[in-house]
Image: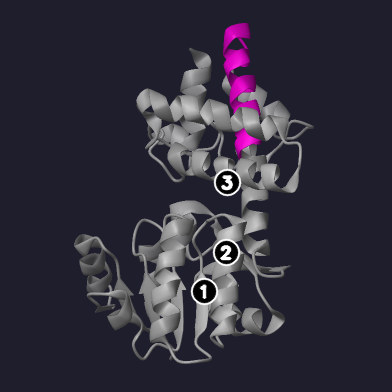
Amino acid sequence: MTKIAFLGLGNMGGPMARNLIKAGHQVTGYDPVPAAIETAAKAGARKAGSIAEAVSGAEAVVTMLPAGAQVREAYAAIVAATPKGTLLIDSSTIDVASARAVEKLAADKGHDMVDAPVSGGVGGAEAATLTFMVGGSARAFERAKPLLEKMGKTIVHAGAPGNGQAAKICNNMILGVAMIGTCEAFALAEKLGLPAQTLFDISSKSSGQSWSMTSYCPVPGPVPTSPANRDYKPGFTAAMMLKDLKLAQEAAQAAGAATPLGASAAQLYGLFCNAGQAGADFSGIIRMLRS
């Protein structure tokens, strides 16, 4: 049993913390939203009223926070309140620069830290089938891996600190662009009188195949588990996709990389969110493209 502090108990962090509890670990949870702490407590977590209280006595700290600013602020408090050698795992999706700055802060204080953003959405968090893209030293990765395996199915060491975040934003840029292309194809098929199921049957087994098509089809019917069959109730919101696309664009600018399709995807998801659809599943952008 490992004593774990878990900070950030929202839609993703809450299920991840529960899976650590199910695996037999002692989890102390903290979140600025009291209801999130209460939900975690019902699953067996110990409640904390502050970051310092949560991490007191912890052997490992896991964070799932909204953005780089919150991660920087949280880890300034975490490294000050934990003894040398504590394992730190940040599963937030943030900018690469913040991830590397926080990991340097942790290393300077004698901690092992990894950036370990996830792919798989709320469903993956609940089922413990997430993919973790992990940046950090080989030693930190080996220490973190047993805990990550209790929350996910695929654990990949992406290399140096910050590389987990780099992998995440590159992956989600691919996803955003692919989803828009898939939605455009289904919207065009409708206009041309080609049934959605027919297009799916053909494209899912030929060169148009992608995860957006076969696992997350944006129209009702072909993939019964996709959000399209529940009025685009989110597994992964449009707002979260927009956040990741913006992070990718910031990274592209900093690195001098050309990403014209990524930039277009960010603009389209910006329009979709501004139209009041930020809380809808990102595959729901097909509704905007139809109109």
The residue carrying mark 3 is 247
Q: CA distance from mark 3 to mark 2?
A: 12 Å
Mark closest to the chain's N terminus, 1 or 2? 1
- At 52% from the left edge and 83% from the top edge, which residue is drawn? 87
Q: Earlier in the sequence, mark 3 or mark 2?
A: 2
Residue density around tag 1, few if under 14, some if 14–19, many if 20 or more, within 10 Å: many
Q: Which residue is mark 2?
A: 99
Q: Quadrant of the N terminus?
A: bottom left
Amino acid type of the residue that numbered disc 2 sits on in the rendered structure:
Ala
Label 2: element kind:
helix
Q: Give, as a three-letter code, the residue at label 1.
A: Ile
Q: Is residue 141 above or below residue 261?
A: below
Q: Examine the rendered structure and indicate whether residue 291 appears above or below residue 67.
A: above
Discs 3, 2 touching: Cβ within 8 Å = no
Q: Quadrant of residue 48?
A: bottom left
Residue 70 percent coordinates (x, y): 41, 60
Magenta span of residues: 176-194
Horizontally, residue 27 falls left or right of residue 36, namely: right
Q: Which residue is mark 1?
A: 89
Compared across the picture, whether 28 is left or right of 270 comes to left
Q: Is residue 234 magenta?
A: no
1 or 3: tag closer to the N-terminus: 1
Residue 126: tell me if it is visible.
no
Q: Give the residue type that dot 3 points to.
A: Leu
Residues at marks 1 and 3, CA–CA distance in whole angstroms:
20 Å
Depth check: give the residue in front, 147 or 199.
147
What x and y, as percent, mark residue 248?
A: 63, 45
Left/right of residue 198 with respect to residue 238 in the rendered view: right
